[in-house]
Image (cartoon, rainbow, N blue to C red):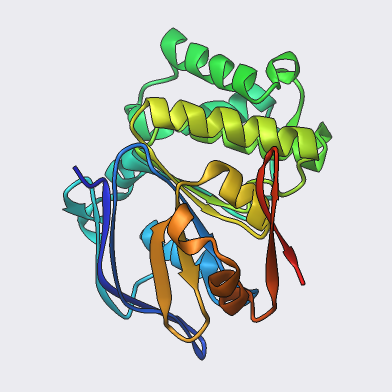
Amino acid sequence: MTVLALEDLSVEISNTCVCHDLSLGINPGEVWSILGRNGVGKSTLLKTLAGLRTPVSGRIILDDQEVTSLNRRSRAQRLGILFQENETLFPASVLETVLTGRHPWLNPLQGESAEDIQKAREALELVDLDQMSDRSMTSLSGGERRRADLAALVTQEPLVLLLDEPSNHLDMHYQVVMLGNLIADWRNRNGVVILVMHDINLALRFSDHLLLLFGDGCAESGPVETLATEAILSRVYNHTMRMAHTSDGTWFYPG
């Protein structure tokens, strides 16, 4: 069963056509990476999928319902988004911040239950912040705040995760461990993960499908093994890309 479907979707921002008449279906357990040059509209497309921007035309179907027909609460129960940058404005504790992920599931007059708090603590363990639950968010480093934001999404338990540059501010260890743990968790839930990534090799490490944006409205989508080639990625980035094979896998680098 398709979890998320794009039907003849056309998206524009300023003078850029992000995609034109794009149709594809995303199935349970799949992980997709959106790749393209700076300015082609990757983040814009992600916000459109979340229902935060209106497409020029076409439809986005989430769990058999059109995204725009869902109220904010229902949408948040099915879909969670991590923005590229997320500044902390209030001196809440790490645990309080992560608990905001439960808000779509709570009655407005109801506080968090012991089960909600347990979910938040388990999410903090997943991102290795369980020892910092009482710390103020304003006292954390950029990487620690990023991990707290990821924990809030885990606590939200949506069907679809939309992650815009989730590795921002994370060192190499946490880039691999956090993304690996999070994606494994969502695959086990039969959920869907869609990533916007600048790091090609990190994207290919965790994704099984790619959505490639070329900057002129053209897009290609499909399995990694079909689209991750020197010729196609060179077109995507308007720069020669070379492929290297090692005992650890296949890697791409600029020629």
Image quadrant in which you'd find residue 29: top left
Q: Nearer the viewer, residue 252 or 127?
A: 252
Q: Residue at x 32, y 27 (%)?
A: 107
Could you say where residue 222 lies in the image, as x and y percent from the top left?
Answer: 38, 59
Could you say where residue 236 lies in the image, as x and y percent from the top left?
Answer: 57, 75
Q: Residue at x 51, y 34 (%)?
A: 183
Could you say where residue 42 lies in the image, as x and y percent from the top left?
Answer: 53, 67
Would residue 85 be seen by someone viewing this image from the given angle? no
Tell me: residue 240, above or below residue 182. Answer: below
Tell me: residue 90, above or below residue 251. Answer: above
Would residue 203 be seen by someone viewing this image from the given angle? yes
Identify the residue at the far bottom of this view: 15
Residue 64 shown left or right of residue 55 in the figure: left
Q: Nearer the viewer, residue 221 or 17?
A: 221
Q: Residue at x 45, y 17 (%)?
A: 116
Tell me: residue 23, above or below residue 118. Answer: below
Check the picture and name the quadrant holding the C terminus: bottom right
Identify the residue at the far top of this view: 114
Check the picture and name the quadrant holding the N terminus: top left
Q: Residue at x 51, y 91 (%)?
A: 15
Residue 158 shown left or right of residue 229 in the figure: left
Residue 194 shown left or right of residue 21 in the figure: right
Could you say where residue 51 lies in the image, as x and y percent from the top left?
Answer: 36, 60
